[in-house]
Image: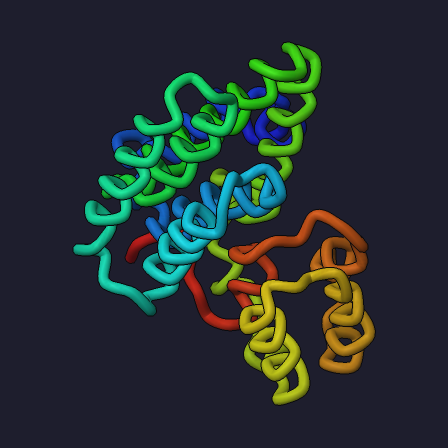
Amino acid sequence: MPSADWLHASQFEAMLSDLRPAIAKPPFSERKLRLVAVACCRKMWHLFPNDACRKVVVFAEQVADGKSDPADLIVHQREMEKFGEELGRHPAQFMVWAARECCNESAWEAAQNTAQELRDRLRKERGDDVARVEEIAQCQILLEIFRSPFEGDPCDEFPSRWTTAEVRLLCEDFMQTNDFREFNLMEEILKRAGCTNDVLSHVRQKTGHVRGCWVLDALLGHRMRVN
């Protein structure tokens, strides 16, 4: 998919295909791919049937950030598999499968399968049109986390002078709380640090920010691709 088309795409699978390890050279960070799955789940947090499912998603998030052992992903997958089977054909089963797929050992498959399960949940209860709206929202999550797979790594574009103590403290606070409602506060702080480009346009957006945001990651030194 050409760069301009990717930035305006509305088909999740087509966009995600450009991030496949077999296509992307060098490959994209597994951390960011798994955070796509997590962000898709957090967007539908209220639809998970219990806290056990949410805790599994949080575990996947911790694995992405190197705070939990990826060897335990399979344990949580099996836990959700058992719970989903007990639910039978209940609509909540799709949410359980989404939590399970967040813990897929393949980060790329975690992103793909989790998003699909969540769309299937909406399609089952509310129809194709609502599922289509959700797919467009998932495409926005890809843009939020990756910007564009055809551009350079933002880490290479951000001068060190932008990461002032004030900027870093605010970034770490967003990461700690997972609350991005005041992300636009970054605009004035980055201006004071000398930032003048499209980064400011991104951070001034009042909604749509998630863990793994390409600006936040670049400021904290999280690379988009595997070196």
Tally of marks: 0
Vertical position of residue 172 compared to residue 203: above or below = below
Residue ID at (66%, 53%): 209
Q: Residue furthest bottom?
A: 165
Image quadrant where one finds the C terminus? bottom left
Q: Quadrant of residue 64?
A: bottom left
Left or right, 173 with respect to 212, comes to: right
Q: Nearer the viewer, residue 123 or 8?
A: 123
- Residue 52, given in percent of the width and then of the height, sits at 42, 50
Vertical placement of residue 157 versus 8, above or below: below
Residue most extreme to the front: 86
State which quadrant residue 181 falls in. bottom right
- Residue 157 picture location, percent across and down: 55, 63
The answer to whether 189 appears left or right of 209 in the picture is: right
Asked if 61 appears above or below 26 in the picture, the reply is below
Residue drawn where x is 27% and y is 48% of the image: 76
| Residue at the image point whose x is 60% and y is 21% from the top | 122
The location of residue 163, given as percent across then percent down, is 60, 80
User: In the rendered image, is residue 172 in sight?
Assistant: yes
- Of 19 and 105, nearer the camera is 105
Which scheme is used to colour this image of the protein?
rainbow
